[in-house]
Amino acid sequence: MNKKQKKMLIRILISAALLIALSFAPVTGIARFVLYLVPYLIIGYDILLKAFKGIKNRQMFDENFLMAVATVGAIAIALYEQSGDYTEAIAVMLFYQIGELFQSYAVGKSRRNISELMDIRPDYANVEQDGKLEKVDPDEVEIGSVIVVQPGEKVPIDGVILEGSSTLNTSALTGESIPREAAAGDEIISGCINMTGLLKVKTTKEFGESTVSRILDLVENASSRKSRSEEFISRFARIYTPAVCYAALALAFLPPLVRMIGMGLAADWDIWIYRALTFLVISCPCALVISIPLSFFAGIGGASNAGVLVKGSNYLETLSQTKIVVFDKTGTLTRGVFEVNGIHHNEMEDEKLIEYAALAESASSHPISRSIQKAYGKEIDRSRVTDIREISGNGVLAKVDGHEVAAGNDKLMERLGIEYIGCHLVGTIIHVAVDGTYAGHIVISDVLKPHSKEAVRELKTAGVQKTVMLTGDIRRVAEQVAGELGLDAVYSELLPADKVEKVEALLASKPEKEKLAFVGDGINDAPVLGRADIGIAMGAMGSDAAIEAADVVLMDDDPMKISKAIKISRKCLRIVYQNIVFAIGVKLICLLLGALGIANMWLAIFADVGVMIIAVLNAIRALFVKNL
Ligand code: ADP
Ligand code: MG
C-alpha cells in the first residue's frame, strides 16, 4: 500500500469506528447531527470537494456529484423528518470509498508487477573508454555523450548517429513492421533494435526523457487502457447520471404541481421530495462504476499472480475471444537451447569450424548464436571479429581474422551463391563458409519445452479452435515439431516479413469477433507480436523488444500459461457481464419501486450499497485463478 492508500484506509477505519460508536450514543437533535457530521466529513470531504469543483466547471454529472447529492439528500431527509437516521448517508460514502481504495490497490499491484519485470531486463549503455567498451547505467549517461550500440542490442538513449550504418527494427515503438535504414547524421530513438551494423551515437536526451522511458511509463499505466466494457460503463454513466438527476427533479416537482393545479388536491410536497431523494439514493451507479474496472483489475492481478502480465483491460477482453493461436517455434515451443549433434566438413577441423562460427556469431542475440558460442566453450576474443552483419532469418556474416565468414541456413548460402551440402541428420543446419568456399556445417537440435504438448492440448479445452506454428527453421524440423505437438497447421522457412504476411492472411480469413493471438520470443518476430490482435511474449528469455511490443507477457516462458491466461480472461469477462446485468437489473427495478413510492430508504440502501458490495465481492472473485 502506498501513502495515499494508507491515509484512505485510516479515514475508513476512523469513520467506521465513529459510526459504530455513535450508534450506541443516545444523543438526539442538533447534537446528534453535528456528531454524525464528523464521520461523514472524514470519509467524504474529498468527494464533496470534487463534486463542488464539478459543479463549478459545469461538468457535474459524474459519480462524485451523485454521491454528494445522494448523501447530502439522505442527510437532509433525516433532518427534515427529525428521524436522526444519518447512518445510511455515511455508510454509502464509506462503502464507496472502500471500493475506490480496493480498486487503487489492485491497480497498484499489477502495475508494480509489470515494472518489476521490466527492471530485471539488462538495461545498459556501452560507453567507449580508452579503447574499451564499458557497460554503464543509462541513467548516468549525460546529454552529448557518445555511446556504442552493437548489432542485436537495443538503443538505450535517443540520439544522433555519428558513425556507422544499420537497419533498425522500430516495431516495438511504432508497430510498423518495415525495418528502417539509418546512417550517420540520422536521428535514432531508444527502444529500437539495432539489427545489423555497429553504431556510434551521440545522445541528445537523458535516459529519463528518452522514448524508451516514456514507453515504460505507458506500460505501467495499464489501467488507462480501457476495455470496451469499461467504456460502455463510462458512456452509460454519462447518460445515466444526468438522466437520473432530471428524473428525480421531475419526480419532486411534477406530481405535486399536477395534483395542485390539475386536480385541485393538496400538493404533498414532502412526500414527493422524499420519493425523489429516495430515487437519487437508489440510483447511484457506483456498483457498476466500481465493480467493472475492479473486475478487470482483479483479473489482471490474478493473472500476474499466475505469472501472466496483461498490460491493460482491453487485452483481457480480447484474450477472452481468442479462437486462433499462432506460435513461433524457437524459444516459444522449443527451449531455444540447441545442442550440437554433428559437425561435418571438408578439410577444416571440427574445432576450427566451430571457432569460426562462434566468432562470427559473437554479436548475435539469437538462441542459435548463444548455443554455438556455448559449444565453442572458450572465451571469445572480439578483437578478431569485425564487420558483423546479421541477416534475420538467414544467419550472420563477419570478418574473422581477416577471413569472410558466413554462418547460417540454406537461404544464406543461396544468397551468397555458395554451393552447400545437405545433411542426413534431422536438425537445424548451420552452414559455414570461409572466404566464399563451403567449409562444412554444424547440425544442432533443439528440444521441446516440457509442457508444450500439454499446452497445445489445453488450448483446445480453453475454446481455441486452431493452432498454427510459424518458423524460420527448415521444413523437416518444423514438421517434426508440429506433428509431435499436434498443431493444426505449420508454415516453415519464413523470414520475419513472411511471418507478418502469414499472420495478416490469417487475420483476414477469420470473422472479426474471433481473435488471433501470436505467441513469440521477440527474436525475429517482434513485428508479428504487434500485428496480431493480441501479442503474447516470453518474458524470461524474450527480447526487450518483445516485452515492449507484446500485450501479454508470460514471466516464466511456460506455454501452459497461454491457456491459463485465456481461462483467466474468460472468467473475468464472465464476472463483468454478471455484474452489469445484476447491477443494472436491480437498479431498474428499485428505481421503478422508488418512483411508485413502494421502495423506502431501506430498499434504497440495499440497492445502493448492497448491490455494490455484492458486485465488488463478485469482482474480487476474478483474483482467484489458481484452479483454472
Ligand atoms: P524461429 O521462427 O524458429 O524462431 P528464426 O526466424 O529466429 O526462427 O530463425 C530462422 C532460421 O534462420 C534459423 O533456423 C536459422 O537457420 C537461421 N538463423 C537466424 N539467425 C541465425 C544466426 N544468428 N545464426 C545462424 N543462423 C541463423
Ligand atoms: Mg524465434
Image (cartoon, helix red, strand yellow):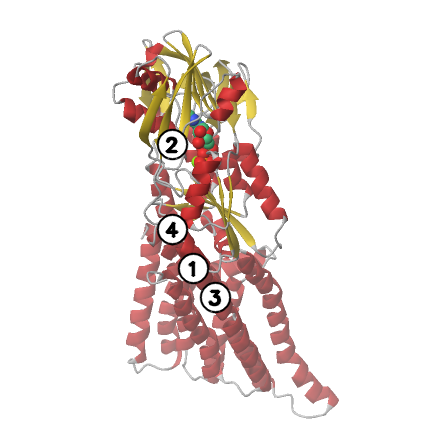
| Residue that badge 3 annotates | 574
Going by the numbered disc 2, the residue's amino acid type is Leu
Q: Which tag, 1 or 4, sits closer to the chain's start?
A: 4
Going by the numbered disc 3, the residue's amino acid type is Arg
Q: Is residue 138 above or below residue 304?
A: above
- Between disc 1 and disc 4, the foreground one is 4
At 52% from the left edge and 36% from the top edge, which residue is drawn?
A: 527
| Residue that badge 2 annotates | 425
Q: Nearer the viewer, residue 584 or 404?
A: 404
Using the image, tell me which numbered label, if any, was put on residue 453: 4
Q: Which tag, 3 or 1, sits closer to the chain's start?
A: 1
Using the image, tell me which numbered label, if any, was put on residue 567: 1
Q: Which tag, 1 or 2, sits closer to the chain's start?
A: 2
Going by the numbered disc 4, the residue's amino acid type is Lys
Q: Secondary structure at mark 2?
A: loop
Q: Marks 3 and 1, Cα distance to the nearest angstrom?
A: 10 Å
- Between disc 3 and disc 2, the foreground one is 2
Q: Quadrant of ligand 1?
A: top left
Relative image position of residue 540 (x, y in whole percent): 34, 40
Q: Marks 1 and 4, Cα distance to the nearest angstrom?
A: 18 Å
Relative image position of residue 375 (x, y in whole percent): 28, 25
- Between disc 1 and disc 2, the foreground one is 2
